[in-house]
Image (spheres, helix red, strand yellow):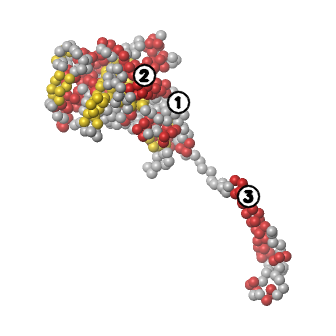
């Protein structure tokens, strides 16, 4: 109940109190009368507020007084070249509309880190500065091609019991990455629910020994230096001993073969015989010249350079093993860029993932004549051998398989029966427009790149051609292939 002024009148006898204790007189100054009015008002309002507070607490819990408005942290979008949005929205509500499509490539964001970035993995991290500035980043990816690659990789992993599979597709002449796919992949919207191993961007980061897909580079280097002709016969015995290691051929063939047939039969002994025409330092320089063991020039995404040992430390068998694609490691992206040298008439074009990305200038590695000759050999390898399963319907295809042993660092050696199965190729063979590398890592239900990697190349390539054939500006070779 509010107090009235009457109740504030002192009782009789109160005048005996000290003056400092007496109540104000009616003739007190105006300032004191105003203070008295304020106190009276507060005495009336405070109990009412307390009652309202208590009622609200009983009905809804303690109310929260409104604070300042928090502006969302602006962040740019990531989209494919054909307009599919892969990442959008502010940091506090970052969304990935395509779910798992290119998830291993895009990555994800989180709270602000001590280093000043919100991106935690993938492009969200490598492009963090641009995205924080609110820039829209357009990738070179074709969403339909990326989706086709991911679907077929997932099927290959399921069918073979493999640990993983990867695919990279490059546009010939520009270096644009049309697809960089990994399986398993994940949905960045739910990254916390995905095992770390499944979040790896294997297409750009996983290093592996490529196997026999390296052999065309030796043939190209020897042709370029004039140390090999296309018609000469090279001894190809069933086995050969180099240093402390014995190398064998798997396929039956004649005791002498041309370079084209060495590639067709994937002869280890013939390849090793050819490698002896180079000193170790020369062979090392040629391998590096195709980009192996070198940092990738692309800065928009995280990549690895593979491993190429110093030739000064090679033992005799190292020279031989690197000729057949063991003892040297690479990534799917790096291998695709090397095969693109053959597709681009001898010119190395640095790959790029972002449309406005600045990469170093292209440079020549081989003469156009040598690149075309080796490309012709790879077309023969597909057509004349057991690789017809890699050929796209109605389109000439050039390529090579590789079945490589897998080194286990923990064990300190190669694991028997464990392989990386690769097919690297291009189409159309006469004037390539696409280079593709596919690898199935450590399958448990099959161990042949001819039976696993080659059909995977064909399955993805056929979808790419079908996708392009219906485009308004479709190339004639694509339209002819689906008629």
Return the residue at label 1. Answer: 84
Spatial separation of the CA atoms under disc 2 and disc 3: 67 Å
Answer with the quarter of the image where residue 178 lies: top left
Between discs 3 and 1, the one toward the N terminus: 3
Return the residue at label 3. Answer: 55
Tag nearer the camera, 2 or 3: 3
Q: Position of residue 463 (x, y in %)?
A: 46, 20
Answer with the quarter of the image where residue 477 lies: top left
Between discs 1 and 2, the one toward the N terminus: 1
Q: Which residue occupies the foreground of this view, 183 or 89?
A: 183
Question: Up-down: is 301 above or below 64?
Answer: above
- Residue at image point 72% right, 60% down: 54
- Residue at image point 43% right, 18% down: 462
Q: Position of residue 249 (x, y in %)?
A: 22, 21
Q: Helix or strand or loop: what does disc 1 sit on?
A: loop
Between discs 2 and 3, the one toward the N terminus: 3
Q: Is residue 58 left or right of residue 468?
A: right
């Amino acid at each position: 109940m509010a107090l009235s002024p009457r109740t504030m009148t002192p009782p009789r006898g109160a005048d005996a109190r000290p003056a400092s204790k007496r109540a104000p007189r009616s003739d007190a100054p105006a300032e004191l009368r105003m203070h008295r009015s304020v106190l009276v008002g507060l005495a009336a309002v405070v109990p009412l507020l307390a009652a309202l507070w208590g009622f609200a607490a009983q009905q809804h819990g303690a109310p929260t007084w409104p604070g300042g408005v928090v502006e969302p942290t602006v962040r740019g979008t990531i989209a494919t070249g054909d307009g599919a949005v892969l990442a959008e929205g502010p940091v506090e509500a970052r969304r990935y509309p395509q779910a798992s499509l290119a998830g291993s490539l895009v990555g994800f964001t989180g709270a602000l880190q001590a280093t000043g970035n919100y991106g935690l993995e993938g492009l969200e991290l490598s492009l963090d500065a641009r995205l924080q500035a609110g820039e829209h980043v357009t990738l070179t990816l074709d969403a339909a091609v990326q989706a086709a690659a991911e679907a077929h990789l997932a099927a290959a992993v399921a069918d073979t019991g493999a640990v993983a599979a990867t695919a990279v597709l490059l546009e010939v002449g520009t270096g644009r990455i049309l697809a960089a796919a990994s399986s398993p992949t994940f949905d960045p919207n739910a990254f916390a629910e995905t095992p770390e191993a499944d979040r790896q961007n294997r297409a750009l980061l996983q290093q592996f020994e490529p196997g026999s897909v390296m052999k065309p580079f030796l043939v190209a280097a020897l042709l370029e230096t004039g140390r090999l002709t296309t018609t000469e016969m090279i001894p190809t015995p069933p086995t050969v001993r180099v240093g402390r290691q014995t190398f064998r051929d798997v396929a039956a063939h004649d005791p002498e073969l041309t370079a084209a047939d060495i590639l067709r039969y994937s002869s280890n002994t013939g390849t090793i015989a050819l490698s002896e025409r180079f000193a170790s330092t020369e062979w090392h320089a040629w391998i590096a010249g195709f980009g192996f063991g070198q940092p990738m020039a692309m800065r928009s995404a995280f990549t690895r350079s593979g491993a190429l040992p110093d030739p000064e430390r090679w033992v005799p068998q190292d020279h031989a093993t690197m000729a057949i694609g063991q003892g040297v490691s690479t990534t799917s992206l790096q291998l695709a860029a090397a095969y693109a040298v053959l597709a681009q008439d001898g010119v190395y074009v640095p790959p790029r993932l972002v449309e406005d990305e600045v990469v170093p200038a292209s440079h020549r590695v081989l003469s156009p004549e040598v690149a075309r000759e080796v490309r012709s050999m790879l077309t023969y390898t597909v057509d004349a051998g057991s690789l017809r399963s890699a050929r796209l319907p109605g389109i000439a295809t050039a390529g090579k398989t590789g079945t490589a042993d897998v080194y286990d660092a923990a064990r300190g050696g190669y694991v028997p029966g464990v392989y990386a199965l690769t097919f690297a190729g291009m189409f159309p063979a006469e004037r390539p427009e696409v280079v593709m590398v596919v690898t199935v890592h450590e399958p448990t239900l099959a161990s042949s790149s001819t039976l696993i990697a080659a059909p995977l190349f064909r399955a993805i390539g056929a979808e790419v051609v079908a996708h392009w054939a219906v485009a308004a500006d479709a190339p004639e070779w694509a339209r002819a292939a689906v008629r």
